Image (tube, rainbow, N blue to C red):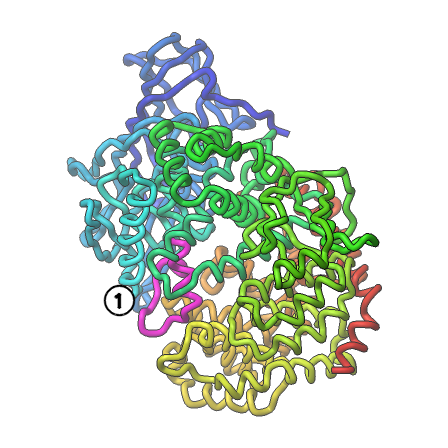
Amino acid sequence: MAKLERFYNTFQPDHYDVFIDINRAKKTINGKTTITGNATDPQIAINQKNLQVTSVQADGQELDFKIDNDAEAVRITLPTGKVTFTVTYNTKLTDSMMGIYPSYYEVDGEKKQIIGTQFETTFARQAFPCVDEPEAKATFSLAIKFDEHPGETIIANMPEDHVENGIHYFEPTVRMSTYLVAFAFGELQSKITETKGGVKVGVFATKAHQPKELDFALDIAKRAIEFYEEFYQTPYPLPHSWQLALPDFSAGAMENWGLVTYREAYLLLDPDNTSLEMKQLVATVITHELAHQWFGDLVTMKWWDDLWLNESFANMMEYVAVDALQPDWHIWELFQTSEAPMALQRDATDGVQSVHVDVNNPAEIDALFDGAIVYAKGSRMLVMVRALLGDKALREGLKNYFAAHKYSNATGADLWKALGDASGLNIGKIMNSWLEQPGYPVVTAKINDDGDLVLSQKQFFIGDGKDVDRQWQIPLNSNYDEAPQIMAEQELNLGNYQALRDKNDQPFRLNLGNNSHFIVKYDDTLLNDILDHADELDPIAQRQLLQDLRLLAQGQQVSYASLIPLLKQFKDSTSAIVNAELYQIANSLKMFAKPDSPAEQELRQFFDLLSKDQVKRLGWLPKDGESNDDQLTRPYILSASLFARNNDSITQAHQIFTENQDKLESLSADIRGLVLKNEVQNFGSAELFDKLIKAYQQTADASFKQDLRMAIPNTTDPALIAKVVSYFEDADVIKPQDLRAWYRGLLANKAGQQAAWNWLRDEWQWLNDTVGGDMEFATFITVTASVFHTPERLNEFKDFFEPKLNTPGLTREIKMDISVIESKVNLINKEQTAVNDAIAQQ
């Protein structure tokens, strides 16, 4: 295992002159980087990976150097003090979506490419030699030459200064970390506007897209920068903010300073035919990345162990911003259906990482990017902070934080100090119990034998978990004033329950707004009181009630069968977020019914009971002027009706397909995916399969592509399943960035599961070679565990992955996912009969 060395300790760079000459035809890079900085030791090291270094010079003299590939380093001998030296090297363009790489696309059948960059976490060293650590901030002057032809555009972090002898020179950057350096070039179209403060804002994409697809992102980006400048009380520090859609992009988006890069699906959309859900997703991705321009770029974590400082904060701020820009969307409801359940689910598995994680091995850096923890749990943690402080103190603290650390680095303690000084609260003491500890508590609320209302906290586990008596400082957010703001003790007695109930004249509840990261287990008296008044609860409270009970059932603290009558109680809800949770529970019931069994048939009938009145109310096609809730609810209802094999729904979806089969792209995006899935499942043929695959390859509409990707893997024909698998390694059909979604779709199809699972095991080495250096590689394991739930699959999973336990970056994931499958196997073994009996009685 590689030793973790911090090169910044012996050499602190101040400025880089980076010259890069790219030849796309030959896939070669020739580079020369001149670095000025301070050497505190005659033996320094800078990072390189896969660079062929030909010389290191200072003052025209050759310096001694040694390549250390194990440490991804060039070790150099030079005088101490202020030094300037030049490294000359060459390397190759790769197709790994890391470093400098090509993105491929087609326009009118002609294959083209644009060159882009991805340097987070440690891939700048694949492009130029540098101290590739967040703390090693410096200024960068980029000079880029390439095999240019007329009609091409090149963009970078800063504006272009001049062009000389075919070399594009860019203005020097502000002080920044290496992983934020970015540039791109190719045949690009763009739309540009300007903020009230004079910042140029642009959206760039390939010419495969319609110009109108850039409009939505341009509007959101402009208004987001204006919002952040006002909220942070700190100006945007660069002259421009470019948003670039890359056809091949591993992550969702990347906050490169001044040149943010995105997957096409998360930036571009057709304003005339995109679902509200997709618009919300794109808006939150854009506002997330632009939040980083201050929180992460202007002030950067000192080391990767404080990655949460970047990501947790941006994850919260994306919702704060969109709520201000589009208040009619009620975007915090999306937070309840995405961040909250994701964090609660994963954080309940023993062995999960804490938000703040020590990094002892370079391979562990990418493994830190756990979306459910560093992003989702971290953002819930900061929502708790915001609720405790209020926006006035939060904004004052942030303004002071930016002023104290701009163009530099910070730690979590620095943030807590700034917020504590602004609010007068010891926020660090409260939040460290959430930051440094994995997991979260279940707060049990019960009436004891003396009639007192007693609260107690204990770590909550789904599956086996080792209880080590962790305690949290819990913001209770109760509707009874008798409950304190913070519960720091193991147990708390609030006094006589009946007296409290009479005084407050409403059922006792905790965690109002579901803003704190814990769940509540009410005893029967308290729970029944809440359920008797459930229609008085707002949608977030109704959803939270169902969600907490589902988690408690998964943790075997309440009966899973007891959830089933509740689904009927809430089945006519007009709230999208209540339906989202209702159908999450309903869909989880599928694991208790064996395929093609009488129990599965009864489950289908239950789905019909849940959905038929809503289908009648909403219909298949969107209506002008309908509410956001109705738009967002329709897919849940129709999906349930199709699972129920409701003849009217199957027929209507088929009719919609037939009427639009020559213009599928123009089908309403709200229902297009379900119409296509129904056609594949119930009216599938080789001809239809080929037609949809061809549409997938040809369309530039990312939303339509996503619908096709959801539908095609549902084929039940063995020959067509084999065909899907054959495309997994054909980048002309399925790009590596989209492979995980295709794999999961086929794995979740009972007819395709064996073929998908066989492919993963047979082609693991290919997968490792193709996406193995990527931060999402481990999620192939995660999605497999999310589908598997039988003893046979558990054993196969263990047989395959346990020998890989010592693979850096995969250890935690493999251990946790074994536990995830085991917990489902044990739950089914315990509850299967009761659950199926309860369904049969509905």
The residue shown at (44%, 23%) is 46
Residue 83 rendering spot, x and y as whole percentages = 33, 13
Q: Where is residue 382 in the image (x, y as percent from the top left)?
A: 50, 44
> With 240 as the anchor, is 815 left or right in this view?
right
- Give above or below for 500 relative to 172: below
Q: Which residue is drawn at 63% across and 58% down?
A: 503
Q: Is residue 285 magenta?
A: yes
Using the image as rendered, state which of residue 9 and residue 620 is in the foreground: 620
Tell me the crowding category of disc 1: few under 14, some 14 to 19, or many 20 or more residues within 10 angstroms, Cα based. few
Residue range of the region highlighted in magenta in the rendering: 264-286
Q: Residue at x 77, y 58 (%)?
A: 557
Compared with 67, 686 (above or below) is: below
In this orientation, which residue lies closer to the viewer: 617 or 812?
617
Inspect this view and state whether residue 761 appears.
no
Residue that mark 1 sits on: 212
Q: Is residue 255 left or right of residue 540?
A: left
Question: Which quarter of the rendered picture does the C terminus lie within?
Answer: bottom right
**Is 513 colored magenta in this rendering?**
no
| 440 relative position to 313: left or right | right
Q: Is mark 1 on a helix, strand or loop?
A: helix
Q: Give the vertical position of 356 relative to 286 (above or below).
A: above
Would you identify the image quadrant in which residue 628 lies? bottom left
Kindly identify the amino acid type of the residue bearing the numbered disc 1. Answer: Lys
